[in-house]
Amino acid sequence: MLRKAKINDINQIQELINTFAKKDLMLPRSLNELYENIRDFWVYEENKNIAGCCALSISWGDLAEIKCLAVKKGKQKKGIGSELVRACLCEAKELGAAKVFALTYQPEFFKKFGFRKVSHTGLPHKVWAECINCPKFPNCQEIALLKKL
C-alpha cells in the first residue's frame, strides 16, 4: 500500500536508506533529519513493513527534488519504486512545481518518467546545500536529471 509516511515509520525508513548508504549508493540520513522532513516522505507498506520510500522536497522557486528513493532488496523490480516516483511527481504538480530534479546513480530508471540529463551547474546553488555534508563532495558522481511538469 502506497501512503504518506507517519512518525512511527521513521526507524524503518532510516534502516532502509542507511542500508544503501553503507554501500555508497545514497546519502545516509539521521533520525533528526527524518523527523524534520517526515512530511516529504512517501512509503510503500507491505504487512506493516516498509518495502520502499521516497521523498519530495521543495528546493527553490518552482523546483522540487525527488530524493531518498529506496526499495528493499528482494522487493525491487516489482513496480514499487515506480509507484513512489509517480506519487512524488503527482504531489509536485499539485504543489505547483514546474520542474523536478533527481541526483542519482540510476539515470535510466528516471528517464522512464521523462527525466533528462542536465548539467549540475544548471541547477540553482540552493540545491547543493546538502552536498556540502557529503563525503564525496565536490567529486560527485551522481547524475543530475530534470523533468518539466
Image (cartoon, grey):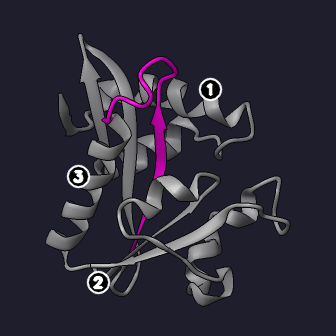
Q: Which residue is mark 2?
A: 98
Q: To which quarter of the image does residue 9 belong?
A: top left
Q: Which of the pair 52/106 is nearer the observer?
A: 106
Q: Position of residue 4 (x, y in %)?
A: 21, 41
Label 1 belongs to which residue?
19
Disc 1 to disc 3: CB gap under 8 Å:
no
Whether residue 142 is visible: yes
Report if residue 70 lies within the magenta region: yes
Specify the amino acid type for callout 2. Answer: Ala
Q: Amino acid at mark 3?
A: Ala
| Residue 3 among magenta residues | no
Task: Report which residue position mark 3 lands on.
Answer: 87
Q: Is residue 66 visible?
A: no
Q: Residue at x 63, y 71 (%)?
A: 129
Q: Going from the N terminus, do you reach mark 1 or mark 2 first?
A: 1
Residue 131 rendering spot, x and y as whole percentages:
69, 64
Q: Residues within 10 Å of mark 2 (few under 14, many from 20)?
A: some
Q: Position of residue 38 (x, y in %)?
A: 34, 45
